[in-house]
Amino acid sequence: MDKQLRILVVGAGVGGLSAAIALAQIGAQVDVIDIKPDNSVPGVGFGLRLNGMRAVRELGLLKQCLAFGTKPSGLTYYDNRGRHLSDLSYGPDDGDVPSILVMSRIGYLDVASARAQDLGCVIRMGTTVASLEQTPESVAVTFSSGDEADYDLVVGFDGINSQIRHEYFGAKYDPTPAGGVAWRSAMPLADGLTDTTFLQGHGGKIVFSPLSADMMYMVLTVAEEGRPRYDPADMPQIMYDRARALMGDSDFMADSIEHVRRSTSVAYTPYSTVWVPYPWFRGRVMIGGDAAHTMPPYLGSGAAMSIEDGVVLAQELAKDQSLLDAQLMYMARRLPRARAVHERSIESMHEEFDSVTPDAFQRRLQFLRDLEPIANEYANRLLALPY
């Protein structure tokens, strides 16, 4: 576009900060707000596959992420007795870009915040939008603090419970419960664990993934109807009980599972999904990331899809075309790709949870032995496609 754009990014999480960086790199004047008072995240790690890491490189964050992240060489599936099922690859690296990097979420937020501010972005925590008023030329924003500003574009990267989506796209796109939950905790690295390990149990799985030289994170995913609320003080014991239910009387990885009972960093997340159909904009108000397409983390690509959104939006806004043309090209590039990853993630979740009865459990184990390597290679090739 032929002028410096003034853009408001709502949301200072992984997607919002990544979008802010990408937009600032094309010369936009970017403000970022977030309703949270700070970006502290309790003991949670996440992984970025090749597509996410390519986008990280475009944001100028590759070196920083490689410095504190861990690169598994692959992942291994076991059953709940510790019997080997299959070895899976994350696919080939792309030069200096690894096919997978596991890192702490707060670590990424720290380096992304620093990069955004170095590029001139203004980040205001504890602030949200009180009202928006669009004209053909701009968006007038009144903040919760009472001050006002005009922008060329407002972009909501404010997550699954997006205020921007709810208020400007409609309540019909609010999150839909997916029927599963994730329990997460950071803990000391298990002796000898160098790669990501999946343990398939009855109706769910446990994941152990190295975060650093001395730390790993454990994720437990299980089908759970309803959305119960738990006292945080009880969550370590509940997570432990869920893990023991998946593992039965097996002592495989028992020491690490026992450590959950002493954890001070258990996080509980009921899975929900969001899918906003075409288009992800209403005039000069847009959404991206989890605000537009929340998916369960079964391809490890929820965060990566959010980062890609910001990079692609900046690429289209940098071209010599109108705002509407940029938005249409953004949708043409993002909608099919996000939809494919969204659908495959949900399919993978249901396949995992369909393992409760003895017969279903044996079918799941047979699938993991024989067909999961093929399904995994499909995911690798899907994610490696250009965004």
Image (tube, rainbow, N blue to C red):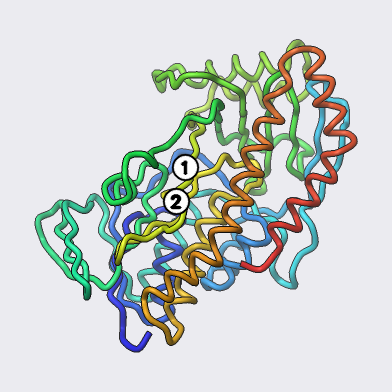
Above or below, 24 relative to 134: below
SS for callout 1: loop
- Give the percent coordinates (x, y) of residue 275: 48, 45
The residue type indicated by label 2 comes to Ala
N-terminal-most mark, 2 or 1: 1
**Closer to the camera in the image, 137 or 356:** 137
Q: For residue 292, which numbered disc appears in the image?
A: 2
Which residue lies at the image location 42% right of the left edge and 37% below the top edge? 175
Q: How many marks?
A: 2
- Give the percent coordinates (x, y) of residue 97: 69, 68
Above or below, 53 relative to 36: below
| Quarter residue 351 falls in | top right
The residue type indicated by label 1 comes to Val
Name the image quarter holding the C terminus: bottom right
Left or right for 34, reference 205: left
Above or below, 222 relative to 75: above
**Label 1 packing within 10 angstroms: few (<14), some (14-19), many (20+):** many
Kindly check if marks 2 and 1 are in contact, taking CB atoms under 8 A apart as contact.
Answer: yes
Which residue lies at the image location 16% right of the left edge and 65% below the top edge? 140
- Give the percent coordinates (x, y) of residue 344: 66, 44
Left or right for 288, reference 372: left
**Closer to the camera in the image, 243 or 193:** 243
Which residue lies at the image location 31% right of the left edge and 83% below the top edge? 4
| Quarter residue 174 falls in | top left
Residue 357 seen = yes
Left or right for 255, reference 113: right
Left or right for 2, reference 136: right
